[in-house]
Amino acid sequence: MNTKLSPRTQVALYGLLCLLLFPFIFPTWWMITSSIKPISQIFAFPPELFPSRVDFSSYTTAFEFQPFARQYFNSVYISVVVTVLTMLICSLAGYAFARIKFPGANIMFMVVLMGLLVPSEVTLIPLFQMFRAWGLSNTHWPLLLIQTIGASSVFATFIMRQFFITLPLELEEAARIDGLSRLKIFWTIALPLSRPALAAVAIFTFLHSWNSFLEPLVFISSRELFTLPVALVNFTDAYGGEMWNVQLAASTMSAIPVLVVFVIAQRHFIEGLAHTGLKG
Amino acid sequence: MASAKPTTGMEGARKRPFWTIQRKDHVTGLIFVAPQFIGIITFVFVPLILVFYYSMHEWNVLAGTFTFVGSENYEELFRDRAMPGVLAATAIFSLGLVVLNISLALLLAVLVNQKLTGMSVFRTLFFSPVVVSVVAWAIVWRFLLQSNGGINGLLYMVGIEGPNWLRLPHTAMISLIVVQTFKSVGLNMVLFLAALQGVPRELHEAARVDGVPPFKQFYRITLPLISPTLMLVSIVTIVGALQVFGQIEVLTQGGPGTSTTVLVYYFYQQAFQFLNFGYGSTLSIILLGIVALLTYAQWQLRRKVVFYEH
Amino acid sequence: MANVSLSGIRKSFGAVDVIQGVDIDIEDGQFVVLVGPSGCGKSTLLRMLAGLETITDGDIRIGERTVNELEPKDRDIAMVFQNYALYPHMTVAKNMGFSLEHRGGSKEEIATRVNDAAAILGLSGLLDRFPRQLSGGQRQRVAMGRAIVRNPQVFLFDEPLSNLDAKLRVVMRGEIKALHQRLRVTTVYVTHDQVEAMTMADKIVVMNGGKVAQMGSPLELYDRPENLFVAGFIGSPAMNLIKGTISAQGFVAGGTVLPMEASASAGREAYYGIRPEHLDLVSDGGIAAEVLLIEPMGAETQLTFRCGQVQLIGIFRERFLGHVGDMVRIQPRLDLIHLFDASTEQRIA
């Protein structure tokens, strides 16, 4: 694997990689270019790889047809709140499971791990009924609560616990002797040292929340409460016909910010996920 | 030392106070895990009990009736004409996805692991669909896979007339598998990449000294050494495949006919479109059973298949 | 500064008793070394003193206070850990001042004390560095600096030199000792290295199997080990210990008779102990021995002999000019022979 490859092999390798790359980047390219094509050009045969005329009207239509700005804001604020709270709650829990030998810790950890094994669909009907009984259906509460402390948060707790276990115990003992309480040890020693794990948790949680589709589809019925994924599938005209260019414009707007953040921070993304994902 | 001494203020400390260092620490631990634990009890444990309870009831939302029917819903599984098709679609989709996803992920990981310039760019690009939302990705592909869409347009340019991909049973299923693979293969690639980089360099050097050709090195050294990751990733991928919903909702809505109605999608239809909550609960328990079996199989296989663990 | 007393200390993890009743009194300003093989309970004992482990039974007093239920931070102690336990995300200055910060010291006061400690340890130029930018010896000094800054009543060291290479270990050993002579703070130091114990301690506590095997000054332990364990543990190379029987002619073991002063307790099963440095090569008298191994070390020469089935090691100042296989005569110094009972393993007076 570590031999120097001959120039011919190198060229072949690059060629193969570029070929393989096509289905990974073409859809994104096609999404962006089609969203700025006039509707008449969108199904042009043969297809136009570079739009000959540019038309941004589908972008304005997206905001007129639905409360898209509001829906966009919903997705952003839900994902951000869920991510921040998950990081806090799950690192606290992960820390306690890793470090504090309180009675019942093992049983509680087993119960929490159940969240990893149970597919979220299995609990969807009861959760739907519970939130309806509490008068919280068609609000953002089910999304916020289930994502922050429900099954999907367990992975974060697990990642954090695995990471805290690897931190040298002596550091915390030194901190105890230096006069810190548990909470302060957690906050000033353990947490700052667990940045790689926290980054992975933040990425996983944000993406999961941002992409979540089934839950908002089930829990939310008002357009102004929709999150982006649900809003995206709702761009159909009065006769149920697809509004392709508007859908693509909205999809572009939902995908581009995350893609940009990803490209800027790709190293942290990939390495963070690789290292914690392996243990998970 | 333990002999009786006059009691002084200092000696008071000899009696253990109730709030010992240890007890205080235990309480701290409980407070730390409380939000997570309460969340799991409320949003996983209780619903899990409820879903079993619901599955034993006939639940008519419109008439407002909720009657105990025992195993009726479970017997319904065997009478349900759609069920064989649903299970077949689930099996084809999951297995097809795992095979395609794992092989492609492994291939990409090996390619990207070569020490050549620009590999991190390729790595980033292969990974990029992972961060695009499922729905946006599916919408683009639905657009591409129209009979007059981009894919057929490209095929037309090389002289092939493509089918209406999402409207024919076989091509619809294949499209779903392929679209889902491109979406998620980057994550598995990265996991394999990390595993490949964890294989000690000396082993390959030793093999080269011994004159083992590169392909044999891959099968006899690399593959066995990354088998724990291979194992884990396969199970995680298959469990993930059983839960794919967004793509199907956007691309085929279970059609044409019921050819792409997998278990999760059928569950969604029964529960939230036909408001058949009792039978829906039963279907979700079947899903739970399959996932539990797979998890159990993973534990068993771990011992047999995995040659090497850290 | 304070004296420290441990009385009747016990510690059990479930059914396992790791500390089985330990009493130690440490005087104010004394340098006490806890030494013993791994698993003997020395580190556990130190951690109990620090408050990092709870005690199952007994009392720990520091100065006038019983500290059993006090948090580590309230015990007025400072500890240097084996891996230094420097906070990787803080600079040297921050590491050293961290505990003062949490005890409500003013910024100026913290800065002064950190600078003073840094000056003592030669760290003044490194205050803005992070631990990862330091060498092993520098990290070790920062760990000590962190302890000094606090100006505690007791210093605790948990195998602080075991991560350093051999040469640096000798240097740091000297520095710790010099620091103690300068500050005169009561110090408890744990090590598994008996050379460290011998060179540094005012008082050594040898531990074995959760109990104190013997306590005393280094030379007391060397000259008069009270039991077989201490005899074998203290001294390098270790004392020759041979099992056999005391008789009127001498000590009978493995087909040979080792010379000893006439003893009343003939017929008793015992261990015969003689330190390698207490064997002499003689031209006549003594006992016949075959040279098995010659290990010249420059200043000294270490020889391994065989007399009958008994193997003995000797250390000599003079160079040995013979060869392996030569027959020589060796003579133990009769007044420096140690005898231990075979069953109780205690010293026979």
Image (spheres, coloured by chain):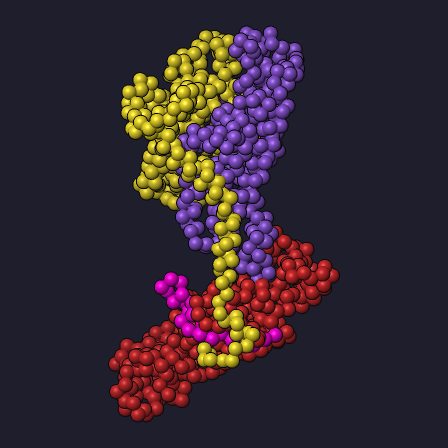
Residue A115 placed where, x, y %? 43, 38
| C67 vs B301, nearest the viewer | C67
- The image shows a total of numbered marks equal to 0
State which quadrant residue B281 falls in: top left
Q: Which residue shows up at 42% across the image and 73% down it?
A: C21
* In-front residue for pair B45/C83: B45
Q: Residue furthest front?
A: B64
Q: Is residue C18 magenta?
A: yes
Any magenta on residue C331? no
Colour of the chain lettered C: red
Q: Is residue C125 left or right of residue A248?
A: right
Residue interval drawn in magenta: C1-22
Give the image location of residue A167, x and y in percent: 51, 52
Report the magenta stretch's main SS: strand
Q: Is residue B11 left or right of residue C247?
A: right
Instruction: Please give the name of the residue rendered at 47% of the width and 75% of the height, measured from the top-left corner.
Output: C7
C199 lies above or below A6: below
**Is residue B89 at all visible to an observer of this figure?**
yes
| Residue C150 sits above or below residue C28 on the image | above
Counting from the top left corner in percent of width and height, residue A137 is at 52, 28
Tint of chain A: purple
- Res A254 quadrant in image: top right
Q: Quadrant of the N terminus of chain A?
A: top left
The colour assigned to chain B within the rendered structure: yellow
Observer-nearest of A98 and A222: A222
Residue drawn at x 63%, y 60% is C99
